[in-house]
């Protein structure tokens, strides 16, 4: 199989981008690597939207979106495996910054942040996480200058926030959201699943089962959130819950009764590994 082009500096990526014809469309899928089918679904979607243009994958475990006691050091990495998968998906160029300094040249830190959309869910449990995400994705958009950038709905809040960044900073690109890809037993694919031991992996199935239980309650007409999610502790045991919330899909503010499209979103730790998942509840 052909090897994919790998660039490691901002200057190289800018030169590569400048060498493309004006009419050449560029698609970008930002990731932290350790690629799985969820990532590959985004790459395929981006490929299909650039009409024979260029597909770019970025792989960067962005330190500024991790808190001091989070799993930055334990985040799984597999550069060679990722490059092979990228080549098989028709990626034209992989941007693997050789160090964080490449994207954070200093000497002053410049941040992109949002007001609103970040008070609940991951924003409430991971201080500064979305500031890190908004900043790194803005930098990648500025350097790669994609026409389309594709993200997964597994990180639903991230997608909503990045749409706001795109709109408010006038990035001339389309943000596309794609459905959650799951393992055959229902667990949402995640690079972090690699850090689950056998027992925690089995216990983590409580998450998709719980989402299904709530969906069934909703389908049978229950609209009161307290009734829908009241038994979360029980149903998600022995996981340790970071949050279980039902929010409005547009404002990401909690609702007590579902009269408009809503999102049930959860973050639960199993064996020390933080897993997130969600499902839309559409009245
Ligand atoms: P990450 O490498 O975890 O930062 O994720 C990179 C992109 O892949 C983000 O847009 C995620 O939302 C997306 N993604 C991660 N897991 C999945 C999944 N199971 N299904 C769909 N998209 C995913």
Image (tube, rainbow, N blue to C red):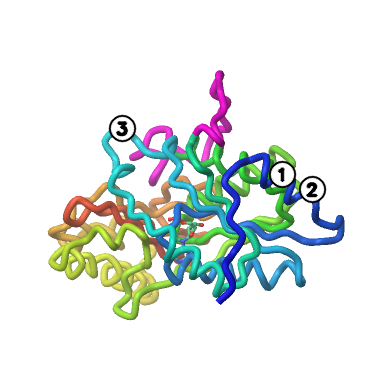
**Residue denoted by label 2:** 18
Magenta: main secondary structure equals: loop
178 versus 164 height, above or below: below
Residue 115 in sight in this render? no
Q: Residues within 10 Å of mark 3 (few under 14, many from 20)?
A: few
166 versus 183 height, above or below: above
Name the residue at 37% across, 67% down. 189
Mark 2 sits near ligand 1, with its Cβ under 8 Å away: no
243 versus 216 height, above or below: above
SS for tag 1? Answer: helix
Contact between marks 1 and 2 (CB within 8 A): the answer is: yes
Q: Residues within 10 Å of mark 1 (few under 14, many from 20)?
A: some
Labels 3 and 1: the sequence-earlier one: 1
Q: Is residue 237 magenta?
A: no
Q: Which mark is residue 217?
A: none
Q: What's the CA distance linking mark 1 and mark 2? A: 6 Å
Q: What's the CA distance linking mark 3 and mark 1? A: 32 Å
**Residue denoted by label 1:** 14
Quarter occupied by residue 35: bottom left
């Amino acid at each position: 199989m052909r090897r994919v082009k790998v660039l490691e500096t901002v200057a190289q990526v800018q030169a590569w981008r400048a060498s493309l014809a004006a009419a050449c469309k560029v698609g970008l899928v930002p990731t932290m690597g350790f690629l799985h089918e969820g990532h590959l679904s985004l790459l395929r979607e981006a490929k299909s939207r650039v009409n024979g243009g260029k597909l770019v994958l970025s792989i960067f475990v962005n330190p500024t979106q991790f808190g001091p006691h989070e799993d930055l050091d334990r985040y799984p990495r597999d550069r060679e495996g990722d490059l092979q998968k990228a080549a098989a998906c028709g990626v034209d160029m992989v941007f693997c910054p050789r160090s964080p300094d490449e994207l954070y040249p200093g000497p002053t830190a410049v941040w992109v942040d949002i007001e609103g959309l970040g008070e609940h869910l991951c924003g409430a449990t991971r201080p500064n996480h979305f500031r890190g995400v908004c900043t790194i994705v803005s930098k990648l958009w500025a350097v790669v200058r994609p026409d389309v950038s594709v993200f997964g709905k597994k990180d639903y809040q991230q997608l909503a926030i990045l749409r706001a960044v795109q709109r408010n900073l006038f990035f001339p690109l389309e943000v596309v959201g794609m459905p959650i890809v799951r393992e055959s037993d229902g667990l949402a694919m995640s690079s972090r699943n690699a850090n689950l031991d056998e027992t925690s992996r089995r216990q983590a199935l409580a998450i998709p089962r719980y989402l299904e239980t709530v969906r069934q309650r909703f389908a049978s007409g229950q609209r009161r959130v307290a009734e829908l999610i009241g038994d979360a502790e029980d149903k998600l045991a022995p996981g340790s819950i970071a949050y279980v919330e039902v929010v409005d899909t547009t404002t990401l503010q909690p609702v007590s009764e579902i009269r408009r499209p809503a999102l049930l979103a959860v973050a639960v730790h199993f064996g020390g590994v933080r897993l997130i998942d969600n499902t839309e509840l559409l009245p």
